[in-house]
Amino acid sequence: MKIIQQTSETLVLQEKLLGIWFLGLGTAATGFFIVMSFESPVDLFGGVCIAIAALVATLSPTETCGFDKTTGLITMRRQHWFSQRVQQQKLSEITDVRVEPYTVMGTQFFRVSLVFSSGQTLAVTRSASTDKAAKQTLAQQIQNFLDLETAEPDTAVAIR
């Protein structure tokens, strides 16, 4: 997620899943090449590639997370071409911002999550990244904006 707007009262983060868009573009280009180069029935595979690329482009979401101190709300918006889902929570209920690791097929991924006073956690974005430093920087920026105390990292070791 990238910060697209930051003032003393608002912080807006947004993520467009460009990797999915590029994958769709490559699939569409491959399909177009197959349609133009081959005859039936092979060109049907090209048509299927183009249809898959259109579906991927249609379904890849744009996620926006807005922190607004004037209203006291955090607004999570996830929108596709045909639908939009909005979720709101109170800023005052956020107690911590964490970088949560999880492993998929031996690869460690990270995502930023908000922790609420009820114990509930809410991922700032559904997509994850292997770039731990970028996620830690984003979590720190959110903590600074919300004036939350910074928790000591689990891996910190005091050397004397």
Image (spheres, rainbow, N blue to C red):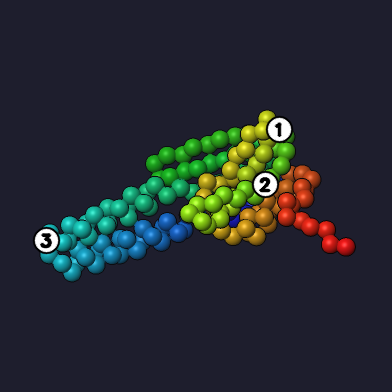
Which quarter of the picture shows residue 27? bottom left
Residue assigned mark 3: 40
Q: Amino acid at mark 1?
A: Ser
Name the foreground residue: 12 vs 109.
Answer: 109
Residue extending farthest right: 160
Q: Residue at x 51, y 56 (%)?
A: 106
Instruction: Work out whether mark 1 precedes mark 3 in sequence or the reverse, and give the earlier one.
Output: 3
Q: Where is residue 7 drawn, in percent x and y?
A: 71, 50
Q: In whole angstroms, how far apart are the C-alphas of marks 1 and 3?
A: 61 Å
| Quadrant including the C terminus | bottom right
Residue assigned mark 2: 98
Q: Residue at x 28, y 65 (%)?
A: 30
Name the foreground residue: 149 vs 92.
Answer: 149
Q: Residue at x 36, y 61 (%)?
A: 25
Instruction: Indicate left or right for 9 with 129 as reference.
Output: right
Which quarter of the picture shows residue 28? bottom left
Q: Amino acid at mark 2?
A: Arg
Instruction: Work out whether mark 2 precedes mark 1 in sequence or the reverse, and give the earlier one.
Output: 2
Instruction: Work out whether mark 3 precedes mark 2 in sequence or the reverse, and give the earlier one.
Output: 3
Neighbor class of circle 2 (other Cα within 10 Å; few <14, some 14-19, many 20+) is many
Element class at badge 3: loop
Disc 3 to disc 2: CB gap under 8 Å: no
Q: Is residue 125 visible?
A: yes
Q: In whole angstroms, how far apart are the C-alphas of marks 3 and 2?
A: 54 Å
Element class at badge 2: strand
Residue assigned mark 1: 117
Instruction: Indicate left or right for 70 with 35 as reference.
Output: right
Q: Amino acid at mark 3?
A: Ser
Q: Where is residue 11 drawn, in percent x and y?
A: 66, 48
